Amino acid sequence: MESPIFLDHHSTTPIDPDVFSEMIPFLTQNFGNASSSHIFGQEARRAVEKARVQVANLIGANPQEIIFTSGATESDNLAVKGIAESYHRRGNHIITTQIEHSAILDTCYFLEKLGFETTYLPVDKYGMVDPEQVASAIKPNTILISIIHASNEVGTINPLAEIGQIARQAGVLFHSDAVQTIGKIDVNVDHLNIDLMSLTAHKVYGPKGIGALYIRRKKPKTRIKPQNYGGGQEGKIRSGTLNVSGIVGFGYACQIAQTKMQKESERLIGLRSRLYEGLKEQIDFLHLNGHPQKRLPGNLNVSIEFIDSVTLLEKLKNIALSTGSACSSNSSAPSKVLTAMGIDDNLARNPIRFGLGRSNTTNEIDFVVARMVEKVKNMRESSPLYKLMGSEVEPSPQNRIKMVN
Ligand SMILES: *Cc1c(COP(=O)(O)O)cnc(C)c1O
């Protein structure tokens, strides 16, 4: 197998060729500004509104509740800062979790400097947030709860419907970063009692640089302060000339994801089990990170004792994998998500994240299993600690997980 294998679909996805075809006219002859009143503008506007319906349909929202942004980083910033600014007279407390994307965490750190107060909820050993802990963290001054739908590292799916109900009963707004779940599992803003939701196109086979924030319009009407000012586009919430081709691509990607979701998630669960079973059978001391069932169909995350994951991935040159999230640049630091799950430091430093997606085949999975098993065996041959396993002076549980590279 010559061409590289892409197993990093949590970091991004290739653009679907049909999505690309839909976009092309809006990069060429239909180049109008969607705010212009002439024929060129009208054509662009029609395409944008069609895409808004497609995005809204995927999450059970009304089209008017979709605000296009440059991606989920912007949506997360807009949601948290926009709510903080809009509701600060009511209170200054935000509840979130220790396993959020940095777009949420760093925004909360910033708000703390302005006088806001944040509770970072822990997770259980599977990486799941406990709704009861959310309930007990709510205070009279709580204005927002922001909880990631599924972890981009371990893939664990949080019980948003229960948390949403708690938030609703307490009269607190509820935001979720649903980047990893839209188009992968059922996501419905009403079933989940969501008031704000961050989305991005490039994780669902759409283009990069385009995303959306869902903002509930009724029951309750959610008021949000814009975070950039200008031409007043997107209901004055997000000024800036619309990225028409990106929006068209995002809309079409959502429509495709909706039709393919059921079959594709079953296929990915099958491939994922094949991968996990194959590795587990041939590699001892392999630990699954995350929930055994309640996880994204395409996600597998493991730590292998006596194996430095960065070194292993370097040896697997033609296989695109990641140790943690693509955005955590410091690879030697333990994963914040795994640490929050209470996982031993040495295992938390060495996760291997597989992100399976549409392009992956059974052949690829079998190839990856074979190559990984081979490299792990090689690496362990030079590991004195591993060699002690099963001998009379078996290493202590603390030492076992220490790496030797
Ligand atoms: C990728 C990702 C983001 C960032 O999205 P961009 O559109 O790349 O800004 C935010 N949250 C999660 C959970 C992600 O996986």
Image (spheres, rainbow, N blue to C red):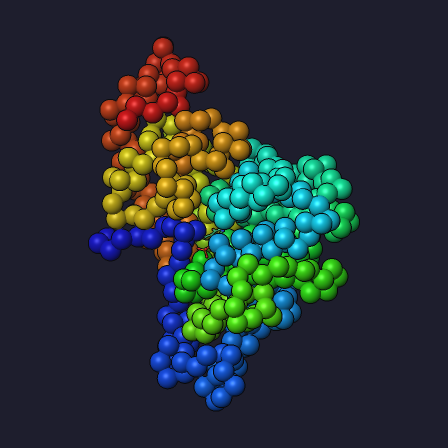
Is 308 positioned to the left or the right of 79 in the image?
left
User: Considering only vertical position in the picture, is 32 above or below 321?
Assistant: below
Is 49 positioned to the left or the right of 159 in the image?
left
Question: What residue is drawn where x is 46% and y is 51%?
Answer: 298
Outermost residue to the bottom: 39
Question: What residue is drawn where x is 53% and y is 29%?
Answer: 342
Q: How many marks?
A: 0
- Between 300 and 313, the one nearer to me in the picture: 313
Q: Quadrant of residue 345?
A: top left
> Is residue 383 among the parts visible in the rendering?
yes
Is 52 positioned to the left or the right of 278 in the image?
right
Q: Where is residue 88 in the image (x, y as percent from the top left)?
A: 68, 49
Q: Position of residue 111 (x, y in %)?
A: 57, 44
- Between 120 and 253, the one nearer to me in the picture: 120
Outermost residue to the right: 169
Quadrant housing the C terminus: top left
Q: Position of residue 394 (x, y in %)?
A: 38, 14
- Between 310 and 216, the one nearer to me in the picture: 216
Q: In which quarter of the image is residue 97?
A: top right
Outermost residue to the left: 2
> Is residue 255 among the parts visible in the rendering?
no
Question: What residue is drawn where x is 50% and y is 48%?
Answer: 103
Q: Quadrant of residue 62?
A: bottom right
User: Considering only vertical position in the picture, is 336 above or below 71?
Assistant: above
Q: Position of residue 296 (x, y in %)?
A: 51, 49
Question: What residue is drawn where x is 58% and y is 73%?
Answer: 53
